Amino acid sequence: MFTTALLGVISTAGARPTIFVPDPIAGYAIGGHDPVAYFVDHKPRKGMSQFEFSWGGADWVFVNQGNLAAFKQAPEVYAPLYAGCGGYALSEGYATAGNPFIFALVEDRLVFFHSVVNRFLFLANYEQHLERADENAPKTGCIPSK
């Protein structure tokens, strides 16, 4: 079962490695978006600095105390798969930076994509693409956060 949402496009730079590299502008993981909000609100929402938590080599921000508490309890559940790298690109054997505005919830996991086309192609056969992305993640430095 998967749920999807598409809300816009931002520029992406460089693939995300095994740790969550802070966005160079926002200074936070995944561009300062609350990872729990993707599951609760089904869209990216900017977090606030008063709800900040360090995990996975980066600082994360949240929209409220509840989302922060949920993430603290199970960060590997809410953090994007593949350290934020694009899921479809990984299934094809290479790493691209995932875009926090182009995402899908696939088997209850947050997956980012580099482009709208990549998102569409991934979802057309997501079981096969998940399997291949899981295989390629260690080779590219985009380790799944399972």
Image (cartoon, grey):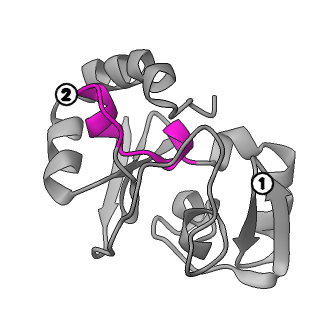
Q: Is residue 57 left or right of residue 24?
A: right
Q: Is residue 94 magenta?
A: yes
Measuring from the top left, give residue 121's x and y in whole percent. Answer: 15, 40
Q: Are marks 1 and 2 in contact (CB under 8 Å)?
A: no
Look at label 1 and name its amino acid: Phe
Left or right of 47: which side holds 15? left
Relative to 86, is 51 above or below? below
User: Where residue 71 is drawn, which disc sits there?
Assistant: 1
Which residue appears at 86% of the width and 46% of the height?
Answer: 73
- Residue type at tag 2: Asn
Within-10-Å neighbours for mark 2: few <14, some 14–19, many 20+:
few
Circle on res. 125? 2
Q: Residue at x 28, y 25 (%)?
A: 93
Figure check: 131 above or below 36: above
Viewer-proximal residue, 27 or 99? 27
Q: Residue 20's x, y, as percent? A: 63, 51
